[in-house]
Image (tube, rainbow, N blue to C red):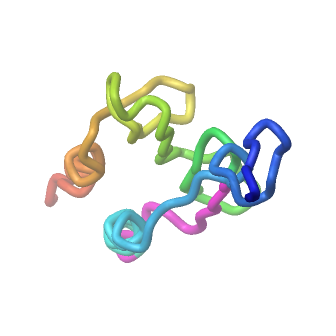
Amino acid sequence: MNVHDPAQGHPTTRGNEPVAFRRDELSDILAIYGRMVAAGEWRDYGISCLPEVAIFSIFRRTAEHPLYRVEKRPRLASRQGQYAVVGMDGRILRRGHDLRQVLRVFDRKMIRAVT
């Protein structure tokens, strides 16, 4: 009989796998991203999958610091919510359990005054 000991660091244990966005989550994020690219506001993005967090970084230009970061932290799912939008200055603009509701912070950015 084989008994698996998670303390041995077997590569298939959840603790060693990086956090990643699911396909439906990426679809929601890329829908917003596509609208903002079409509006000329955003130009580039980057995705990081780390052991504790998955980050979708949004850039105005490639060589800059990200304007926004959409973060997924599964450890916070039972507390304030695993999804967050973080501004360039590090402030959390919105946090919650539902990614679509969190991404609504960008709806205000889509409304422009027509002159």
Q: Position of residue 92 (x, y in %)?
A: 42, 27
Instruction: Judge from the rendering whether residue 45 lies leftward or rightward of residue 76; answer left or right.
Output: right
Instruction: Judge from the rendering whether residue 20 lies leftward or rightward of residue 70; answer left or right.
Output: right
In this orientation, which residue lies closer to the viewer: 48 or 110? 48
In this orientation, which residue lies closer to the viewer: 41 or 57? 57
Q: Quadrant of residue 31?
A: bottom left
Residue 12 shows in this picture: yes
Q: Which residues are magenta?
A: 38-49
Q: Position of residue 68 (x, y in %)?
A: 50, 44
The residue located at (27%, 39%) in the rendering is 97
Q: Position of residue 89 (x, y in %)?
A: 56, 26
Q: Position of residue 113 (x, y in %)?
A: 16, 53
Location of the N terminus (image quadrant)? bottom right
In this orientation, which residue lies closer to the viewer: 5 or 42? 5
Q: Is residue 8 magenta?
A: no
Q: Quadrant of residue 22?
A: bottom left
Residue 57 shows in this picture: no
Instruction: Judge from the rendering whether residue 24 lies leftward or rightward of residue 114; answer left or right.
Output: right
Image: 73 above or below 62: above
The residue located at (67%, 53%) in the rendering is 18
The residue located at (47%, 35%) in the rendering is 86
Instruction: Judge from the rendering whether residue 79 lies leftward or rightward of residue 9; answer left or right.
Output: left
In this orientation, which residue lies closer to the viewer: 45 or 78? 78
